[in-house]
Amino acid sequence: MIKIGIIGIGRIGKIHLENLCTRISGVKVLAAMNPSEAGRAYATQFNVPLVTANADEVLHHPEIDAVLICTSTNMHAEYIIKAAKAGKAIFCEKPIDLSLEKVKETLRVVKDCNVPLMLAFNQRVDPNFNEIKSSIEAGKLGTLRSIHIISRDPAPPPVSYIKLSGGLFLDMTIHDFDMANYLVNDEVEEVYAKGFNLIDPAIGEAGDIDSGYVLLTYKSKVTVIIENSRQAAYGYDQRIEVFGSKGMMKAENPLKTTNQFLDGNGVHLSRNLDFFIDRYETSYLLEMKAFIEALQQQKPMPITGDDGLKAMLLALAANKSMQENRVVKMSELM
Amino acid sequence: MIKIGIIGIGRIGKIHLENLCTRISGVKVLAAMNPSEAGRAYATQFNVPLVTANADEVLHHPEIDAVLICTSTNMHAEYIIKAAKAGKAIFCEKPIDLSLEKVKETLRVVKDCNVPLMLAFNQRVDPNFNEIKSSIEAGKLGTLRSIHIISRDPAPPPVSYIKLSGGLFLDMTIHDFDMANYLVNDEVEEVYAKGFNLIDPAIGEAGDIDSGYVLLTYKSKVTVIIENSRQAAYGYDQRIEVFGSKGMMKAENPLKTTNQFLDGNGVHLSRNLDFFIDRYETSYLLEMKAFIEALQQQKPMPITGDDGLKAMLLALAANKSMQENRVVKMSELM
Amino acid sequence: MIKIGIIGIGRIGKIHLENLCTRISGVKVLAAMNPSEAGRAYATQFNVPLVTANADEVLHHPEIDAVLICTSTNMHAEYIIKAAKAGKAIFCEKPIDLSLEKVKETLRVVKDCNVPLMLAFNQRVDPNFNEIKSSIEAGKLGTLRSIHIISRDPAPPPVSYIKLSGGLFLDMTIHDFDMANYLVNDEVEEVYAKGFNLIDPAIGEAGDIDSGYVLLTYKSKVTVIIENSRQAAYGYDQRIEVFGSKGMMKAENPLKTTNQFLDGNGVHLSRNLDFFIDRYETSYLLEMKAFIEALQQQKPMPITGDDGLKAMLLALAANKSMQENRVVKMSELM
Amino acid sequence: MIKIGIIGIGRIGKIHLENLCTRISGVKVLAAMNPSEAGRAYATQFNVPLVTANADEVLHHPEIDAVLICTSTNMHAEYIIKAAKAGKAIFCEKPIDLSLEKVKETLRVVKDCNVPLMLAFNQRVDPNFNEIKSSIEAGKLGTLRSIHIISRDPAPPPVSYIKLSGGLFLDMTIHDFDMANYLVNDEVEEVYAKGFNLIDPAIGEAGDIDSGYVLLTYKSKVTVIIENSRQAAYGYDQRIEVFGSKGMMKAENPLKTTNQFLDGNGVHLSRNLDFFIDRYETSYLLEMKAFIEALQQQKPMPITGDDGLKAMLLALAANKSMQENRVVKMSELM
């Protein structure tokens, strides 16, 4: 029985808490921390024995094996370091931090403390994307040539969020950078990125872009093209298309229903799922199962802090490329 | 807070128990009965206060408002009658019984006791089928002309099950009969049915068919065609297509993933979901929510015992039509 | 070089003429007859040497090997008989005649004269439907169990046409009866048919139905269900679905374009092709190629007068079943 | 009646000849030139009055209004210039020439002679792509943000062809550059291109790439991403996806048939159409109709020599970008 403490019971913390309490066996949530009452009330509902506003009570709880860190980004590094020093296994929402130095330092502590750390790139375990990964590994696609990743949100977040987000490439594209690394399984050689403020002038005034395009060239000459937008009129759009020497595989958007309506104007299908909570519902469960299973079977974590670092470096290279309007070699960032 | 007792913690009882304990608010499961240990252990996991092998403890539990009857069919009528007499609201898996007389008698008792009874035709709340129903009601399809319902199982059940099932029309087509009634919202005038034993000779030896075709003519001249098979090599197939004067609407099968693989042979999509547990996962939750909501708001039950009786009469007419190889008027069965 | 005469240069005669003149090699159109000027002018455009209003000039043209009969139905039998007696190979649009006796007599003459006769059930060579036929023959679907054929016109023909058409089953369903026979490759044992006047009261006043449903039971226990409508708000609908022990195959409607438009309401695809001229454009070419090839290689005709007779008998049985509201054995019509 | 002369009766010349002779009214082909016998025999079949091996006989034919130039690229400029000086309207296959200087000179002569010139970017009139263009113009997509164009051939051409082709960007991407210009309707500001030799080493040895990626930034901040490959295991792939503020529109690949086969492995659809002859069959007819219609109605040509020059400049910029591994401003090429 793995014993868990959760720090942060916001939108994503709630999902993990419910999944752990109702859909994953061999695990027990012993403690839950949230600064505000709403999150704590949610934990109480699931009969969590210790519900507190004090993170340290969770981090130093003697019976707890593993800590989930689901707070806002600015607290991630601090809690990871504390948890690592307390000898807890760690599951942390991405990113570790917006500062490269802090990320590196945090990972150093984790390494020194020799505790397992899993970073929550949940899209890796999405069944549709995972079918692509396993098809690549099975050789079904032959030698990879190019990958096209599209990620578009239904609507931009508040500008207040944007200001603290680190910018589009670090906040949003980061998932796609990780997916690219995961699928290609190689090192990026160079990065070219363009970005524009097309949607909301307030985003531009906050110094960010809302539309980004990145072309990654891997050492193996695989090209990954990423298209991001903070707003799509037709809803949340998350697609991947992989082209290899033996064939091509896509992951299309799941639609809300399977209905087709035919009238004089044509065939009308349903909308895409609304947003990540719906679209990635299964992947949140699967990533938590993967974390627990790795702990139970003492296997290496499927997604590591190093994966987070690599994705972050790509985001930083994309920022540099966009700002200087030139191709950036990854060797420049080392 | 609605207080619930569950009788029968088999495959479907477990689903309802988990849904009630983890996904529906304003409700509490106070008692659960199962004859065997396995079902009881499942209930214990969810901290159900009273877990027992004795149905009467649940049926007469003083604090319980509503009883879920999820046992095998042969116990349904008995437990409904007991629950009705104990003044409990009742949610019962279909069918009430395989004997028309017993069904009528059971419904009489329910009526006399004036308790709410919901029959679990879960497909009515399936989001894809429900989109059809609401489109009909909104007038989007115009005047209905014909409906085509396909229901095919991935593989036939054991012959031992078939022998006690009441036959294909009562066991399997019953869902489609109810769906037809639900969508057309009218009385059937006549029934024509054909059935064959094409799949497994043992089913024929047990006196049943495995492939059935039914054509229902409603008083409003809407025609419903139903195709059933106990086995489909390509998996579970549950589709509806409704043709009206203004357009046509289909509900297609959900596939396991959204992937498309293209090679020299063409485009390859994923398989249909395996079977009803996966295919109707959402509908099991939604029907339970509907039951609880009807209780909380003291609304009429969305699916009644009378709906079950009507579907049963269609199954009996289909049997008669098949045996006598002729069109059967519903008035013959009254 | 096969030399051809065409009788009737209406909508379908024009298609055959153009195909013969521009897309089929080893063939030459020597003569063309049409009662009205418009058809004759069309033939002149293609440099047909003899363009006339007198059918006999075509039927008795000494150099002509084969005659295409593309007039209105009431002249088919007469011209077939004349052509047969003149020793010409014959390609005739369906049906041969609306009178069973006349069809039988015509086929007797054709047999006596020992000339080849191909009946224009063009849907047999439609590439989508043909893929189904060849998959059945290749054993890809295993043992056939059931077939579902949907044929819906975008809009009903004028009532003047309906009055001379022989009724829905003889005029429209005839294609589906032939397709059923073609795919199942067996004899029908019994027929059950229902029909209603749901669309235009004038059709009912003319003694016809506009919505028809037929269930055919073949001797091999294959069931074919046919749904016909004279009007579909969403356009021309021509689909087949075949269910066998090893899998299921559909032929879906081709759409006008491959576009997908996504907005806040969902995914919008194009409309079905407008009507048979567009939908079966390829099949008109392919059937003519098949006719010419059979002549060139002295092979049996791919679709015979007997095929037309069999489909006609099914239509007559359907009429009888509908009128008497009972199952009709095909043996009753022999 | 527009009178036409055709120079070059190869693969594409035959298509135009047949379309002009059988599917377009108000036009007559008076003369056809081909150096080899095979092409001339084809023209004779269509009763072209003058069939010759001497281009000058066509170019100076006194009755001819318009000349189609369908020879190999190296003769295009010479014949355009001669035709222009002879006062003929000109339809020419792309490209005009591989030398920028020669293209400019040729266009100067055309301008001086004041004759209409249409360049055969046939994809512009493909019904699927055209639906995108007209939707953009109708405002259905709102403000354009990005476009993704995929063009992949089923198999690479012979290396002998590659050597004379001008390279991937000039030979293959040229269509996509023109499509991008056509859809965005703006000037490109900068170009970034990458290319690799991934498929056949012989292509690399010939100094060319077989896999190309281009990112175009338009002055209006619309981004166009182009992916090209000389080989796709799954067949000819020609797709466009346009993302705007109000919605997204795709043009998907047409498949060979509409069949769906379902077995235990999933749903299997047909293959893409084989290659451009099939895929663009309709567009070859439509572009010729557009040329003839422009002549008949004395309208400006829908696709001009200037369009060809603009696409060519993008190809040259892409080559420069790839060679120097940097962003190239279009102003550098002026």
Image: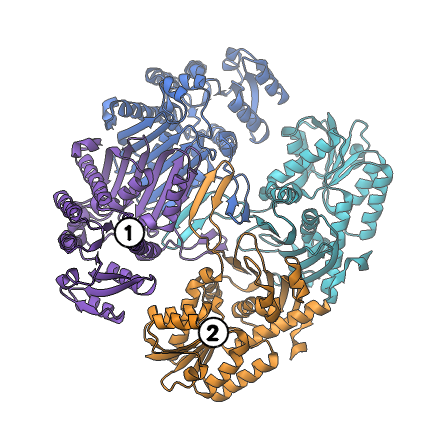
Chain colours: A purple, B orange, C cyan, D blue
Please state which of residues B301 and B96 is positioned toward the viewer in this rendering. B96
Look at label 2 and name its amino acid: Cys
Please state which of residues C95 and B161 is positioned toward the viewer in this rendering. B161
Measure how far apart labels 2 and 1 are at the Cα level: 40 Å
Query: What's the residue at 42%, 25% (across, down)?
Result: D119
| Relative to D204, D298 lies left or right | right
Residue C124 image offset from top left, x and y in percent:
66, 43
Vertical order, C70 against C196 (above or below): above
> Which residue is the site of mark 2?
B70
| Relative to A333, C203 lies left or right | right
> Which residue is the site of mark 1?
A298
| Callout 1 secondary element | loop
Is residue D1 in sight in this rendering? no
Residue B176 image offset from top left, x and y in percent:
55, 66
Residue B80 image offset from top left, x and y in percent:
49, 81
Instruction: Give a yes or no on whether discs 2 and 1 share a subunit.
Output: no
| Relative to B165, B303 lies left or right | left
Residue C56 image offset from top left, x and y in percent:
81, 35
Protein chain holding label 2: B
Please state which of residues B124 and C91 is positioned toward the viewer in this rendering. B124
Vertical order, C17 against C254 (above or below): above
Please tell me the numbered disc located at residue A206: none
Query: In the rendered structure, are the residues bearing label 2 and label 1 in contact, judged by CB atoms less than 8 Å apart?
Result: no
Q: Residues within 10 Å of mark 2 (few under 14, many from 20)?
A: many
| Callout 2 secondary element | loop
Split into 4 quadrants, where in the image is the C terminus of chain C?
bottom right
Split into 4 quadrants, where in the image is the N terminus of chain C?
top right
Look at label 1 and name its amino acid: Gln
